[in-house]
Image: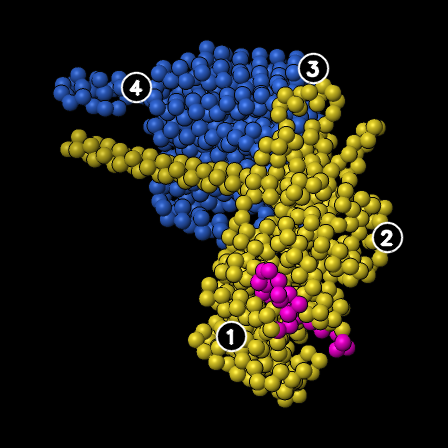
Amino acid sequence: MSKRNEDREQNMKTRSRKRIKRNILAVTYLFVAMFLGMMVYTCHYAMTHKQELINNSYNGRQEIFTAQNTRGSIYASGGQVLAETQIGEDGGETRVYPYANLFAHAVGYASNGKYGIEALGNYYLINSNAKLSDKVANDMAGEKYPGDNVFTTLDVDLQEVAYQSLGIYKGAVIVTEPSTGRILAMVSKPDFDPNEIDAIWDDLLEDEESTVLLNRATQGLYPPGSTFKMVTALEYIRENPDSYSQYRYQCGGRFTLGENTINCYHGTAHGSVDFARSFAKSCNSSFANIGMKLDRAKFGETLKSLLFNEKLPVDFAYSKSRLIIDADTADADIIQASIGQGTTQITPLHLNMITCAIANNGVLMKPYLMDCVKNYEGSVIKQFSPDTYRKLMSEEEAAALNGLMQEVVKSGTGTKLSGMPYTAAGKTGSAEYNNVKTDSHAWFTGFAPAEDPEICVTIIIEGAGSGGDYAVPIAKRIFNEYFDQ
Amino acid sequence: MELYITELSKYFITLFIALYTLECFLVFRFSDEERRSGCYMRQNLLMFLVHFSCFLVICFETGKVEYLLFYILQQILLFATIVLFRMIYPKGNRLIINNMCMLLSIGFVILSRLSFEKAVKQFFIVTISVITGMIIPYFIHKLKFLKSLTWIYAAVGAAALGIVLILGSTTYGSKISYSIAGVTFQPSEFVKIIFVFFLASALYESHDFLRVVLTTILAGIYVLILVASRDLGSALIFFIVYVMMVFIATGNWLYLLMGCAGGSGAAVLAYQFFTHVQIRVQAWRDPFSCIDDAGYQITQSLFAIGSGGWFGLGLFRGTPDSIPFVEADFVFSAVAEELGIAFAMCVILICISCFIMFMNISIRLQDKFYQLIAFGLGVTYIFQVFLTIGGGTKFIPMTGVTLPLISYGGSSVLTTLVMFFIIEGLYIIRQEEGARRVKKKRRQRTEYEDPQPEED
């Protein structure tokens, strides 16, 4: 009897011991799992945020690198030096920009904070991947190690043409390769000489009106004017894929809706126009009419997918474009928005990206400036490759827009580009930026050859007048330069 | 020459510590210490190599003789610890001692690099702690009345914490230390051990509802005193240890669930009512938005971790001193920066290896009191490691606790060493239990002539 009790007790004890064992094991696994999570997180964070962390201005480690390595050089795609550090006889370092103003905003500067490629590639420029034996030799000689060099996608010839063409005007030009996203040229005016940055810095900061340091190509926000009709047209095609070509409108030079009136440029009456004609002639009245037919909620979604009010997939400084349309947008606002006026604001970079997507069968490639990083001996340390961002529109939509844009050059506002050995396609714009109707920014955005686009240009000239008269000739010079090569 | 040594040593140091870490886990393949001795020998060799290579770099970088002398003293201490322990306690567990010495030597390396003066101070505290610690296993194993001191533990612990709250000096918003005759103590460190003893003695015999309630009230007092002292890290450690120990003692998942729910509720309330909690959470979610004040420490820590890469910048090649309180709260980030992420991950794995060994000892102990102590100390240890490393890497909000055995801080290192030696004592108890059981079974077998051989 007592033996059985004892056994039962023994049994219970064993069972409770087993339970404790199991629970301790469970707790052990729990903690080990927590630690594994933490380890993966830490490694991942450290490896993916390395550059961002080192480039942070609060991180004093930059100074370790700059004390140890000579800042690397920046090269154009053709091998020309865009920026280099020269060491004087006293050992003092000077950052030299051989092309002075030409690449001011694109290459930027490396003192007083960093800007442009000097900021973008800072991590690579201050690092040195020289061979260990060379480092030892430098140590012996009491010299710094040579920093790594950044090779950009920029083309000196195109940059020069774009720069000269803008002349004394304020404005911006951006030239890209739609199939890859390579940025071939990027000009912003007014400009400055980065060699003089230390001398002019204080004056520039003091003058609060000055926008000299601003890269208008990526950060300047402008009303898109008629170039926005590409977006309006895209939305109309999207909503009426089968019937848009049957669209007709009788233009009398103005579109009136209650108290609001939209005028065609210089009040020109375009007469009876179809969809392609409306686009080619940039007929404001017809596009205001189209705007009224659009589903505003869907239009809002299209804008979002085209990256309005959104972050752009680039790793340099830029401004977000602004335009919100939703189901509650008023009629008066929608007719303004349809022709790119009103509160709409866009950067030349963003407009170029939309144009690139049209040129590239609807697919947007991420724009980029750095082609590769090499150590001082020329071994590649890092190669940047073209990267697809997203399909912004279907191939059919892109092809339709491409056709419309070819018509602009053939018989519309862009005829100054016709009759060339290549077929160009594009859209002009004359964006009114204040109440005086004569003041307008001249826009052109387009690509060539239209059948198989190789380059895409976007031009804005502040206060010049009509896009067809002022911006299109610049595009022509850039295309000619590119295709003559 | 110098550059070759500093550059190449990075890879060798990483290799040595990686191999050491590997041995830490290979040990678990064998169930008895004798068959593990090959692993232990290799560990001792690798430990020596890591320590030696690090100090070789330090000596080359600084060119100072005192580092060399300091290294020799450290080597003597570590060597003596391993040899003496083996002589005094032949039945002791060598993995725990090896890991303890490995972590200590990493601590010496990184502290020497950060501040020679502090490293020397730490060295003396460690020396004294190890000498006193050596007798602990003996007492743990002999003093049977340790089980019956429940309410004394409770009173002593609460009193020690209470005194700090009332008389303690405030450092950076927290009241955590007081000074006696020029020596500053941080009682919450020692109380961790007392707290585990209290919970174990309160719960090992019976765990009826009333007893759990009573224990909860007392544990609650501890935690509240710590919250009032603004020592949030310690409060969290005490709380987790309490929840876990009640769960293991009772085997009741409901208590675990209630504890977690209660803890989460308390955390939400703390967030609502205390601005210093809100600031910490904000600094965790987006430290870069408040980089000038609340986020400064954590962003500097992230800069350090981000700049090292897998193999580190090399000792004296980075700037870990830009992190405020680096030698106490952010020593892990300093290790990651100069010795590399790979090395830092090995440090974490060594800590996990200690923890697994503690849990292993706990599982095998027959006596529930000792079992609970091994478990409680293990959780205390590993959770503290989790808080400090997680805080420094932005995995969890920062709480400001030390990395045991590596961080600078006398109270912290003394407490951790005592914990390790207590566990050694428990291991010896377990070994004897095992031997007794085998004997008993043999006797039973001969008495009943049981033909079935039983497994242990």
Q: Say how many tags the image has.
A: 4
The reply to whether the C-beta atoms of the residues labelled 3 and 4 are less than 8 Å apart is no
Residue at which label 4 appears: B436
The reply to whether the C-beta atoms of the residues labelled 2 and 4 are less than 8 Å apart is no
Q: Which of the chains bears the disc numbered 4?
A: B
Q: How far, Cα to Cα, is label 2 from label 4?
A: 88 Å
Where is A135 relative to A360, above or below?
above
Residue at which label 3 appears: B66
Q: How far, Cα to Cα, is label 1 from label 2?
A: 49 Å
Q: For mark 1, does the 10 Å Cα neighbourhood hold few (<14), some (14 to 19), or many (20 or more) residues?
A: many
Instruction: Give the structural element (helix, strand or loop) at label 1.
Output: helix
Q: Which of the chains bears the disc numbered 2?
A: A
Q: Which chain is yellow?
A: A
Query: What residue sits 62% from the left and 76% below the top?
Result: A281
Q: How far, Cα to Cα, is label 1 from label 4?
A: 89 Å
- The foreground one among A296 and B391 is A296
